[in-house]
Image (cartoon, coloured by chain):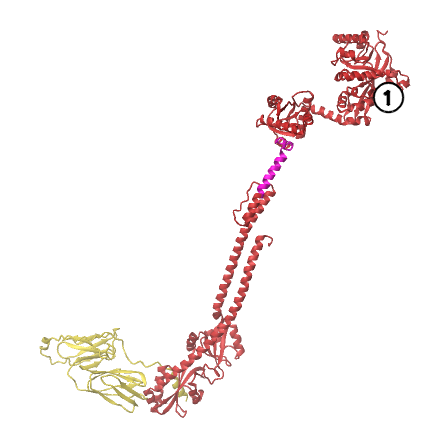
Chain colours: A red, B yellow
Amino acid sequence: MVNSFRSRLLLMFASLAGGVLLISLIAVWLATSNQSERTIERELEVSERVLGELLRARSAQLLQAAEVLTNDFGFREAVASGDEETIVSALINHGERIGTELMVLQSPAGDPIAATHDVTLLPARDELVEMDKSAGLVLVDDTIYQLVTVPVKAPDLIAWATLGFAVDDELSALMQQLTNANISFIDVQRAEVFASSLPVIEQQALSALPGNLNALKRWLTEQEMAAHLVSLQNSDLAFSTDDDLYILLTTDRAAAAAEFLLLRRQYIGIGVVTLVVALLLAGLTARRINQPLARLNDAAEALRSGDYSEPVELNRTDEFGQLGRAFDSMRQAISEREQHIVYQVEHDLLTGLPNRASFQRRLNHSLKEGRGGVLGVLNVIRFREINDRLGQRIGDQILQLVGKRLENNIDDAWWLGRLAGDEFVLLSDGKDLQSFELLLERLKPLLEQRWMLGASHYLLDFRVGYLEYPDHGEDVDTLVRRAQICSTLAKQKKEFARAYESGMDETYMRRLQILKALPEAVSKNDLQLHFQPKLDCQHGTVIGAEALVRWRHDELGVVRPDEFIPLAEQTGEINRITRWVCAAALDQLQLWHEQGHSLVMAINLSALDLQWDELGDYLAGLLKARGLPPGRVTLEVTESAVMADPEQAIARLGQLRAAGMRISIDDYGTGYSSLAQLKRLPVDELKLDRSFITELSANRADQTIVRSTLALAHEMNLATVAEGVEDESAWQVLRQLGCETMQGFYFSRPLAAVEFDKWLHNYEVPHTKELK
Amino acid sequence: MRNFQIIFACLVAAGAAIPSVPQARQLTVTVVDNQGRPLPEAVVSIAAQQSSPGTATMDQVDKLFVPFVLAVNAGSQVQFPNSDNLRHQVYSFSKTKPFELPLYSNQEAPELIFEEPGIVVLGCNIHDHMRAYIYVSPHGQSVTTNNAGVATLEHLATGPVIVYAWYPGLGAEITAEKVFTVDADATTLSVALPVKPDGQSPPPPSSLQQRFNRLKNNG
């Protein structure tokens, strides 16, 4: 509850206001309580004094009236007459005049002349006379009378007249009005009320009390009355000879305290109002403080969740306003920084184009939305060379120019980004290959224009691979890879652009896998040599074998040489393979020689092998180690391998031939070697390509080519070999045309060493018509 | 009350010339108060030959004057007997006849002669409630109405007659009278006086009286 600032502020305000109010209320309470008591006491004192004064004044008044009465001539005459009836009649008449209720006429000697009351109930005459000095109150027959005693003189004293005026409820009520206190004339011991201004019920209650002072006091307390109990025995108020007669002055405490109660109530009212106002003020203040805090809190929450759009405006001039403004400028700064960071994250800083991440997001989004389109990857060919040659700065500037030119020449439908290095990407939802090709047609001449950089200008080659999504791939990586494959293929095929075709990727992947597996092929002993028998064409006898490398990979299965050799050439792995092949082939040759088979071993060399300077030495070393004569080894080099670098090939082959090994030109007839080059080649043998042989017996053109080639070879003292002999008829033709050596499925496919041995053991020269 | 004394001076001389009839003429006057009720002890008078002064009695019974209103001719002698067993002190401060009869008992009956016409108001010095009026007639013949409010005037002169009516409190002056004219042949007259019936009201039995009595009886 008190966790929030607002609650705490409210509590603080309430405690402060409440505390101050409570303390002051207690102070007021105590003060008014005391004051109330004091006031009541003072009022009672005043009432008592006023009562005394009233009684005295009444006595004086009564005395005066009595004197007027007794001075009346008729009265005196009546008294003087001595006739009782007349005296009584006069007393009644004159007594009625002044409303007396007690009349006693006594002779100067003290004998009663006429009386309304028993004289013996009255004090002695001397005391009565003495009473005139103060208000004399006497209880006679349960009624209190205020007595005055005056002489009747004619002119000598003829009688004493005592007049009594009842002190009754009426008088008490009058006194009460004047003294502002209830006046009761009571006998405490007898618990009797003789006259009182109190209501009848209270008078009765008072009468019903047990006759003692404590009971009276208790009753007064119960009745909430403040009281003065004045004994008339020794009082200034009145003179009385009765011991037990008291005047009880009472005032209602509640009535007396009413003003103070009102004051207290007002004060409590003011307190409550103050408290409420304080709470309201606190609430308002808390609200005024809390509102901007809550506002800032919300704003901070919005910032935390990455929403920078809502400005923080408090519209205040105080500290909160300053805080709000600071907060807002912070929001703007963060927003700007984030925008900057986002820009950096999404853009390539060099060209200002969207980068790979944003391309991936863009394409992913399209794929997720199920939109189709076209994607193209554009590479700058040999950009690395530019970087190497001209420096990275120039390279970067060129990339910027490329980006700019591309950007300036595509319409808004196309999304252009830079993936990495020299690789740009074009993307458009809803377009197909045709529209991309139209775009390329437009771009191609632009990209072929010069790239001006300062005073220099450059020409660049571009390759593009493109495809459609989602037809050619369902995820970004696949699509990009396939586009890159297309681009790579375009580069290999020296085309500007190439669209993806299905299968491309699989081939490419297999190539990649092969490339990856190649380095381990030798070391893991996955390579194996197969041997295809070579036979004498004229006699059909086995004269040797061609060593053919086989690669059986766990995952890739059997990898054909035409698959992995070019790749091995590209990676340089060919050297290791060649060495292994040579060693293995010569090991086998040595074995055959030891077994008494005097065979010739043909080993294939790649174009790259010809660049290996130590090749001759290496082979010579192998031969020597095995004690094999070099003449039993034929090294087959393809025509295209020779043509790749004829000069080096001629030199290398010259070395090998000089070492005693035979050189054979493989696949002869498929390359572009000229006769002039052939003339210069240090070769011993031409190996006719299988394409001329397989249908030799049926194809006249092939026959012509083979015939003329054989004739040429013979003219140049070169031996000839035919491969791909698949039927007897081809053999017959070759034999007739004068070919020396042959090989082919008609005799045997390439066989592993063990099988070769079995085949060799079982081989019998076919009996043909011609041979017979 | 305004002065209702109205004097009619329109005596008809021709009427006086009519020969008188030897038959005695009487006038019965009925007086009512302002409520229209018969008013006793009202005085009605006519001008008449001054008759000889007579004697009259104003008694005191049970501390009351009896009668309340006594009409006499001027020069009449009035006795003041005391029928009570206590003493009275009768006095009057009227200009007509101020006097004081010192306290006297029922053994005595003082007499007074009222020479001057006018109103004499009586009181008792020791009984404040006692009050009575002696009407000393200035007219010649004055009578008081009985309990039925009726009085009879004798020996009226012939012709129209002026009748005077008096009652305590008729005007500001105690002597204020009402004057009526009756036709020559009229024998009755009804008079309405704008007054309330007056009289001595003995005080209610006072507590003092009771006390005295009680004490006396006990003693």
Residue under pointer 1: A621
Q: Could you tell me what secondary structure mostly forms the magenta stretch?
A: helix
Secondary structure at numbered mark 1: helix
The chain under label 1 reads A
Residue at the bottom extreme of this rendering: A109
Q: Nearer the viewer, residue A704 or A175?
A: A704
Name the kind of residue labelled 1 in the image: Gly
Q: Is A436 within the magenta?
A: no
**Front one among A525 and A762:** A525
Q: Is residue A332 magenta?
A: yes
**Left or right of A623 on screen, residue B188:** left
Q: Locate the N terminus of chain A by quadrant.
A: bottom right
Give percent across and percent down for residue A317.
Answer: 52, 49
Does A249 appear above or below A287? below
| A639 sits left or right of A414 in the view | right
Question: Foreground residue, A178 or B26?
Answer: A178
Residue numbers of the magenta segment: A330-359
